[in-house]
Amino acid sequence: MKLLVKFILLCAVMLGLAWAFQARTVKAQNYNAFSSIVCDQSKQYTNNANGATQLQAKVATATIYPCGYVISGVGTAVGVSFVYGTTVTTPCDTGQTAITPVMNVSTSVGTIVDHLPTYGGLPTVPPGNNVCILTTAGQSVGAVFYYAFRG
């Protein structure tokens, strides 16, 4: 009888260890290094300008982590993208680098939404660069840009 009890206890311990190892392995496979960067900032844009408009001024000591956007257009098609760069004459006119590709929005397209509550991998903005919205025509556009700072 004692031997049977010891065997059952040994089996229970082995099962518990196997379960703990499996849970740890699954967690490691699904780990996202970016998930700890919470997006707690946003900037809104409503305008019918053509060209770049600064959304976030440069921060000398912090990297900006773009987390997503919402874009809506009214009227005929207009290309919209988010970029970063420095400003000499006009917003983001020097070293302009794409954060997103150009997306065409209009009344018929509706609203484009790409937003996560945590950073998900869009290109980061190096310290010392402004974030701008870039439009290709003077059509009405509404947008929200979500991001986080880390310095």
Image (cartoon, grey):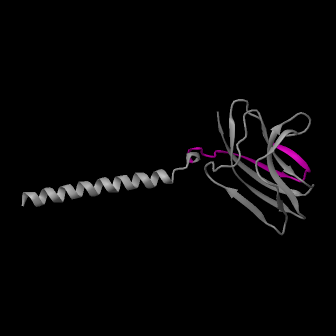
User: Residue 121 versus residue 1: which sits nearer the camera?
Assistant: 1
Residue at 86 percent of width and 35 percent of height:
87
> Residue 49: x, y in percent?
91, 50
Residue at the image position 11 percent from the left and 61 percent from the top: 4
Q: Image quarter for residue 41?
A: top right
- Quadrant for residue 113, please give it: bottom right
Residue lying farthest to the top in this orientation: 60
Q: Which residues are magenta?
A: 35-54
**Where's the C terminus, which quadrant?**
top right
Q: Is residue 147 magenta?
A: no
- On the rendered structure, is 65 left or right of 15? right
Question: x, y percentage for residue 19?
Answer: 34, 56
Residue nearer the viewer, 17 or 58: 17
Q: Position of residue 15 (x, y in %)?
A: 28, 58
Q: Quadrant of residue 108?
A: bottom right
Q: State whether residue 119 is above or below residue 106.
A: above
